Image: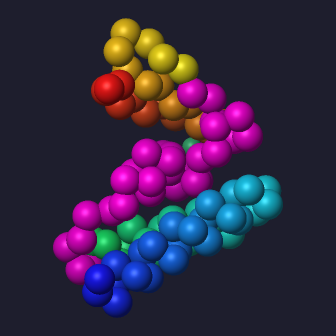
Amino acid sequence: MTVAEERIERLTALAEAAARDGEYGRSREYVRLARRIAERNRLRLPRDLVRFTCDACNTYLIPGRNARVRLQDGHVVVTCDCGAQARYPYH
Ligand SMILES: [Zn+2]
């Protein structure tokens, strides 16, 4: 694993921990940093970070806490508290 990958993993864990503590502002900063590092190093974001962050507001999403998750037509629909929705195919 490269240094950049390690930093991204660490930031993902920090973003999740901050969101669990209700520190959404701090959580967003970690998510933004992780995304920036990934872009700069042309790395793919970890699956967790893609699935559990809001594209609109960068908040790390915790279902039942600051996000709602529903199953609809073979998709998982995640709704952030900010109102943005993301859909993923469900396997
Ligand atoms: Zn959002």
Q: Quadrant of residue 42?
A: bottom left
Which residue is more in the foreground, 59 or 90? 90
Q: Position of residue 43 (x, y in %)?
A: 24, 71
Q: Pick the quarter of the image with the C terminus.
A: top left
**Image point 29% across, 83% down: which residue?**
1
Up the image or down, 58 lies above or below 29; here it is above
Tell whether 85 sits left or right of 40: right
**Image point 57% across, 68% down: which residue?**
13
* Observer able to see residue 13: yes
Which residue is more in the foreground, 84 or 14? 14
Characterize the magenta stretch by its predominant secondary structure: loop
User: Is 74 in the magenta?
Assistant: no
**Image point 45% across, 73% down: which residue?**
9
Q: Position of residue 55 (x, y in %)?
A: 44, 47
Check the image and name the residue furthest to the right: 21
Tell whether 11 sits left or right of 47: right
> Which portion, as a residue range, is magenta?
40-69
Up the image or down, 27 lies above or below 90; here it is below
Q: Quadrant of residue 27?
A: bottom right
**Image point 68% across, 65% down: which residue?**
17
Check the image and name the residue furthest to the top: 73
Colour convention? rainbow
User: Where on the image, by quarter, is ligand 1?
Assistant: top right
The tally of labels here is: 0
Q: Position of residue 75 (x, y in %)?
A: 37, 20
Tell whether 37 sits left or right of 82: left
* Observer able to see residue 29: no
Q: Position of residue 21 (x, y in %)?
A: 79, 60
Check the image and name the residue furthest to the bottom: 3
User: Is 57 in the magenta?
Assistant: yes
Up the image or down, 17 lies above or below 64; here it is below
